[in-house]
Amino acid sequence: MNRSTSELLKELTLNEKASLCAGLNMWMTKGIERLNIPPVHMYDGTNGIRKTNSNEEMGITSENVPATCYPTGSAIGSSWNTDLLHEVGVALGRESKAMDVELLLGPGVNMKRTPLGGRNFEYYSEDPCLTGELGAAFINGIQSEGVGASVKHFAGNNQEFEKMVTSSEIDERTLREIYLSAFERIIKKSDPWTVMCSYNLLNGTYASENEHLLNDILREEWGYEGVVLSDWTAVNDRIRGLKAGLDLEMPGPAHYNTKAIVEAVQTGKLSEEQLDRSVGRILKLVERVTGNKDTQASGEDGYHALARKAAAESIVLLKNDNAILPLRPETASSIAVIGRFAKKPRIQGAGSAKVTPTRVDIPLDEIKELAGTLATVSYTDGYPEDASVNEDLIKDSVTLAMGADVAVLFVGQPEYAESEMHDLKDIELPEHQVKLIQAVAAVQPKCIVVTSSGSALVMRPWVQHVPGVIHSWLSGQGMGRAIAEVLFGYSNPSGKLSETFPVKLSDNPSHMRIRGENGKLYYREGLFVGYRYYDRKELAPQFPFGHGLSYTSFTYSDLEMVQQGTGVTVSFELKNTGKRRGKEVVQLYVHDEECKWTRPEKELKAFAKIELEPGEKQKIIFELEERDFAYFNTKYNRWTADTGYFQILLGSSSKDIRITGRLHCDFGKEEITFHKFSLLSDWLSDPAAKAVLEHCLNEMNEHVTDKVYLNEEFIGFWEDFPMVKILQMFGQTWMNERSPDEIIQELIAQIDQARKG
Ligand code: BGC
């Protein structure tokens, strides 16, 4: 493009402008040849590029152009490593350019309200801070290569059940603190070139035409100036959508809507300025994606090596009793590998995020290679391909395990369970795998279970019988190698759970309302999603949010906290006290001791992944901002941090807090706006109001028998009563013909006077 956006807007006809607001086909925007405006080529996705063989096809069930398959969202979310996410983003940007992809439709950053969400494997976490930081790093990586990202699905699309016709009913505070917070962080820290709106309705209005969501919050409040595009077919009323700020409809060509837009402008239903705003943003996107075409490809081997590294960072060592891992040749010279997933690993989930990998590491082959001559490796299938329980396969497994020094079982959710378009039915392992683990563990005490799934798993029926558990998630094409390296200790596990693993499904806070009903899904658990709920409920999970073991150990000491302005600097020392190099994910949570309103016990506000040699120490510094102490105050429609005491909790998981500090933070005082129903406690908390009130009560007490003295007893009983009602209760003989309303208004005028003067 050689002309500026404003020049182009002048030259484009109304029809051309309207046509630019929808795609050309499944994966391209329209170009306007006469003005030298090229189309934009976009493809999924979230953990790799899903480029279809033609621009007309959706390609969900077919093989597509091979590309590197990185760990899926929940896997890489468990790396807690922003540098890694950035590196993967850069690699994806480069691979995209080599494949002529200019805009990548990812990452997916929806919150995990329920572990049954069919697309949970695509999303990073149940926590908005972790999700937001990882998402921003990933997008900054992609976009640094001149390729656009599309953060999705905005917003409130947290499961698959009837999502196209269901309204996520979310109260404003929960929406802001839980479901929008990651998006907000991402918009502010990485300015994604596009945002994809979701399929669902949010509080009664389709996300694709939701003024409050797209205009008031995204554009006005967060200042977003990029393109908002629709999820594929998420458009309902195109004109309403444009007015709300939905720029681009996908897929196209949607000629009927081009016609509708032209008519709407001609009849005055839509102003041309509104159309121009959207077209202008689309032209800016074209300019951005055509800006950098230099390709610096790392080559297939380089990308595969990164996929392995990313998988190694994502895998979580959940349990390691008696240091059963890593396997040592002295104690594990024969290894029985059991379970089909060892030969055919599940590296990703199904749906639009499914990548056709360039190659796949097979765990069994990698185990054999790393065992070399030090150990013999035997294998059996363990369970059939279908869901049936096959006693013969279990017997074979038991025999194999008995004859070996150690058994390594590969199990997980079946392939069909985790996919876009439907939710999971449960989060237990299939019965044939549970029976297999129980039978093998009964004869072989040295039993290590390697689980695969994109969502939390329930492990209650078997976890207590085995000393070692590794959760490998769906970690992409390098997962096989990464698992083998963790097993033998070539890499030291450093992943931490990005979501809570409950003891049982019904422990989950959304359990009573997992599904919507007749088009409405009420998020009644409110703020209490994931660990926020388990903490508050004092309910022990199987493995808590943030949990993950290492082959080394770390200590935390020397915590210092200083408030400067409205920010707080937190520092402490981390030391590797074990015998191996390793990485620790340090997690900083904030607890508000004093807030009047209900807040979660603690919330993650910062984290870092630190690598240390044995014996090495490092001073870690976190800079917190006022917002890290704030909640969304629906009274003022903004974030509020209350002056008062807070605790800073630093730990190795949400349940393994190693060091805690307490400090008083001064965020100033909110000036109360007094009105008829202001409570006695409001009047007493404001010096001017208190003085006015005391004066008034003195006068009143001279005329009444039941006198009001503002002592502890009176306040303790009446503090939540509106002042107007207190006057009604005690001041009748004094007020005479003046009404309580009139008196309150007089008092409020006196407060205003006192504040001014
Ligand atoms: C998904 C999006 C995806 C789009 C294009 C939709 O079904 O929800 O995440 O980017 O298809 O494949």
Image (cartoon, helix red, strand yellow):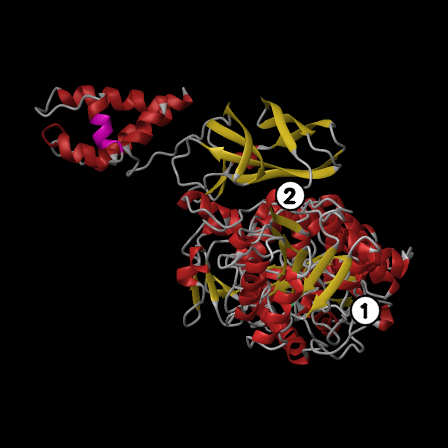
Q: Position of residue 581 (x, y in %)?
A: 75, 37
Residues in magenta, as a range:
714-719
Rendering quadrant holding ligand 1: bottom right
In the depicted structure, whether residue 422 falls above or below residue 685: below
Q: Position of residue 400 (x, y in %)?
A: 67, 65
Label 2: which residue?
Answer: 323
Q: Position of residue 362 (x, y in %)?
A: 77, 64
Q: Please tell me which residue is depicted at 72% across the width and 58% down the height of the picture.
A: 335
- Give the mark nearer the N terminus: 1 vs 2: 1
Q: Nearer the viewer, residue 284 or 46?
A: 46
The answer to whether the residues at label 1 and label 2 have Cβ atoms under 8 Å apart is: no
In the depicted structure, whether residue 311 falls above or below residue 709: below
Q: Please tell me which residue is depicted at 50% across the width and 25% down the height of the picture.
A: 662
Question: Which kind of residue does numbered mark 2 sit on?
Answer: Ala
**Where is residue 439, by image quadrant?**
bottom right
Outermost residue, front direction? 403
Instruction: Rate crowding at label 2 as few (under 14), some (14 to 19) or many (20 or more) other CA atoms within 10 Å.
Output: few
Q: What secondary structure is found at the residue carrying circle 1?
A: loop
Q: Please tell me which residue is depicted at 67% across the width and 42% down the height of the picture.
A: 550
Distance from label 1 to label 2 (Cα)? 57 Å
Instruction: Rate crowding at label 1 as few (under 14), some (14 to 19) or many (20 or more) other CA atoms within 10 Å.
Output: many
In the depicted structure, whether residue 182 falls above or below residue 389: above
Label 1: which residue?
Answer: 39
